Image (spheres, grey):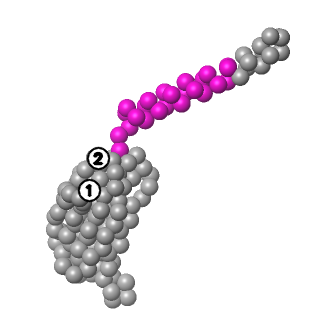
Amino acid sequence: MNKKKKIGITIVLTILIPIVVFFTLYLYHVMVYLKPEPLRIQITNEDTVSHKVNVKVVYGQKEIYNKTFNLKSKDKVSTGEISKKEGEYKLIVTLDNKIIETFKAKVGFSYSHVDVFIVNKSGRVKIEIYQIVH
């Protein structure tokens, strides 16, 4: 092997080895130390009247959460921690026993918190559900 090839290989290895080591350590850190945030749902009543809100959460085929909240105007309530298991969850939100909205939420490294808003737009009450990606 001539001298130029040896120098070229040395330069490439000098660059590649730290990159591989860095990404290996980074992936180890992510997998060992960073756990996804648990699923939590915050419900906000932005309407001017009180509402009864039922929240059901289904994981796979199993219902894992079912609770009803009575919210006065401008009230805000949080479900607390529902589940830490990564995956997709089906949320079924029922407003005043008649308006139903479903939503697919995810739990993972970028997903966890879900916001539910009870809003009155042009005299029509509705449910809005959002999940922000971090």
The residue at the point 18 percent across, 75 percent down is 52
The residue pinned by badge 1 equals 59
Q: Is residue 25 visible?
A: yes
In x, y percent, where is residue 91? 28, 64
Sort mark 2 into few (<14), some (14-19) or many (20+) by Cα contacts within 10 Å: some
In x, y percent, where is residue 79? 22, 58
Looking at the rendering, in which quadrant would you find the N terminus?
Answer: top right
Q: Nearer the viewer, residue 73 or 92?
A: 92
Q: Which mark is residue 85?
A: 2
Sort mark 1 into few (<14), some (14-19) or many (20+) by Cα contacts within 10 Å: some
Is 66 located above or below residue 87 in the figure? below
What residue type is disc 1 on? Tyr
Magenta segment range? Answer: 13-36
The earlier-in-sequence mark between 2 and 1 is 1
Q: Is residue 74 visible?
A: no
What residue type is disc 2 on? Lys
The residue at the point 23 percent across, 53 percent down is 82
Are the residues tagged 2 and 1 within 8 Å (C-beta)?
A: yes
Left-right relation of 70 to 7: left
